[in-house]
Amino acid sequence: MYHGRFNGTHYEIGLKWGGLLLKNGKKLLDGVPFPITEERIKFSRRCIPSYEQYFPEVLEEIEGIAAGQKIASEKLMAVLLSMYCIMPEQKCSCVAFKNENHIILARNSDFLTEIEKLYMNCIYKIKKPAAFGPPYSFQGNTTAFVEMEDGVNERGLAIGLTAVWPSVLGAGLNAGMILRYGLERCATVPEFTEALKALPIASSQTFTAADRQGNAAVIECNAEQTEIRYQDEEHPFVSAVNSFHLDSMKHFNNTQIDNWNAEERYQTIQRAFEAEDKRDPEFAKKILSGWFGFMCRYERATGKDTVWSVIYDLKELEIYRCEGNPSRRKFIRDKRFALLP
């Protein structure tokens, strides 16, 4: 897993990183695991006005990366803005729960082994003109640069996504960009859910979110609909895989595609909460590593695997990450990123 620390404005961060990669002989477009088709280019063009209105800073970062790589930004935009929308592949699992001692969000990222050396853990400290207000610093993990697939910000808001095959598409922000927007601009789960209601959404996905105030929710959404379930007495935990489970969203599911055992993973999480009462980071590790049933037991020969796992304990202000499959590798506490006290 590549580790990056990024400081500066969005454009400065992109320019420095893109240039550093080029200096070391790495061209980002050469590592893209799918063809950059005209379909992707046209789709990204349709989405750009939404980013210009709601999240222009991330476009500035992409322009900076393109300048550092000495390439035109159009193909880079096509790669990043079409992800989660055209032929999505990420297959992940999320769960959030709390008790008097812990507030936890845990996530497995399941993806392609062929590019696992490119996956990134990023720490962002972004500077911005005072008129706009400073974005929150955050740590995140991603299978692609710029977008984030899980993370926690300095205010103690943690978010994880799972992609859902899109039965509808919109011109808007995709899952990884929305998650990053939440980390940069929101301090609590209610703030994030309110932001989601205002954003144009391109892709289909779930977000599992938790904050230091003890709020936790799963949000299932696409270009046409957004539904939210908060953790409460009736729902002592919230969880998500690569399909919708809230009643009003189920009709959007595509049952004809390979979702990497999504329902088995979902049922494993349900069984875990039936089987064990002690709910702490060790319990989360057991869920993610497949202790209670199928979770990360992919055959690597097929090109599939769990490529990282992460646990955010928002009450204890601790981050644990496993860089690889948690059934074979250990979780290590990451002390590099400090949440505000």
Image (cartoon, rainbow, N blue to C red):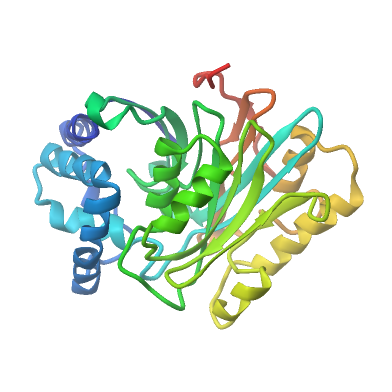
Q: Nearer the viewer, residue 57 or 41?
A: 57
- Horizontal placement of 52 versus 316: left or right? left
The number of callouts visible is 0
Horizontal and vertical percent position of residue 132: 27, 32
Asked whether residue 161 is in view, the answer is yes
- In which quadrant is the C terminus drawn? top right
Q: Residue at x 53, y 51 (%)?
A: 193
**How far across and down, in percent of the image, does residue 276 sit?**
90, 45
Identify the image quadrant of residue 37.
bottom left
User: Is any part of residue 254 visible from this angle?
Assistant: no
Q: Position of residue 337 (x, y in %)?
A: 50, 21
Residue at (23, 46) in percent of width and height: 56
Of 165 and 315, which appears nearest the observer? 315
Q: 264 left or right of 11?
A: right
Tell me the residue at 79%/54% (across/down): 235
Q: Quadrant of the N terminus?
A: top left
Q: Tell me which corner region of the image, top left, top right, bottom left or bottom right, holds residue 266.
A: bottom right
Q: Is residue 125 above or below residue 163?
A: above
Outermost residue, top side: 341
In the rendered image, the vertical position of residue 283 relative to residue 267, given as above or below: above
Where in the figure is residue 202, as x and y percent of width and height? 37, 65
Q: 242 or 214: nearer the eye?
A: 214
Q: Is residue 285 left or right of residue 160?
A: right
Relative vertical location of residue 37 with respect to residue 183 in this rendering, above or below: below
